[in-house]
Image (cartoon, rainbow, N blue to C red):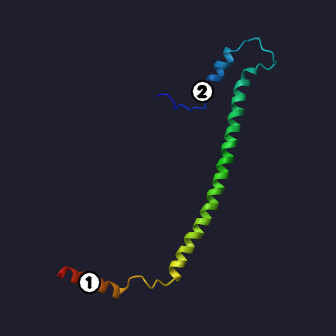
Amino acid sequence: MAPPHHPLRRISTGSLSSLARSTDKNTSSPSGLEFLQPAMTDLADEAATLSANTSQMTTLHEALGTFNEAFAAYLYALKMNAFCVEWPEAPNELSFSRAESLQSKITVF
């Protein structure tokens, strides 16, 4: 089974060794590592992309934290309002008994 494909992956497993074998053996640098330059360029590009994405995720995390704090305060205020405010129009036992008597009158007719 093939490994999952990653759309940004340019250097796959073993490609550095094949890249080193495929380059011209007449190297201009004394170290002979110039075949790594394209791979290092790709790595630098991907590291910059990762850094940008990470900073965007950090910004999103901070915005969500701010929203969560504000929304939690709003929900707490609603809860405290429900505990502190008297609701005179809320149904009570008298309302239920009146509703039952009205229902019995309706079924009689």
Marks 2 and 1, how far apart at CA:
80 Å
Image height check: is 105 above or below 12?
Answer: below
- Please state if 32 lies on the left or on the right of 15 as rendered: right
Viewer-proximal residue, 31 or 74?
74
Residue at point 72%, 12% (across, down): 24
Residue at point 54%, 74% (across, down): 78
Residue 45 position in % (x across, y down): 70, 33
- Say whether disc 2 or disc 1 marks the residue closer to the N-terminus: 2
Q: Residues within 10 Å of mark 1 (few under 14, many from 20)?
A: few
- Please state if 89 lies on the left or on the right of 99 as rendered: right
Viewer-proximal residue, 66 or 15?
66
Residue 49 position in % (x across, y down): 68, 38
Quadrant the C terminus occupies: bottom left
Q: Are marks 2 and 1 in contact (CB under 8 Å)?
A: no
The residue indicated by pointer 1 is: 102
Image height check: is 24 above or below 31?
Answer: above
Viewer-proximal residue, 54 or 31?
54
Q: Mark 1 falls on what kind of element?
A: helix
The residue type indicated by label 2 comes to: Thr
Residue 65 position in % (x across, y down): 63, 59
Q: Which mark is residue 52?
A: none
- The quadrant where residue 36 appears: top right
Residue at point 67%, 45% (across, down): 54
The residue indicated by pointer 2 is: 13
Q: How many marks?
A: 2
- The quadrant where residue 70 appears: bottom right
Please name which of the two marks, 2 or 1, marks the residue nearer to the observer.
1
Viewer-proximal residue, 20 or 69?
69
Q: Residues within 10 Å of mark 2 (few under 14, many from 20)?
A: few
Q: Residue furthest left?
A: 108
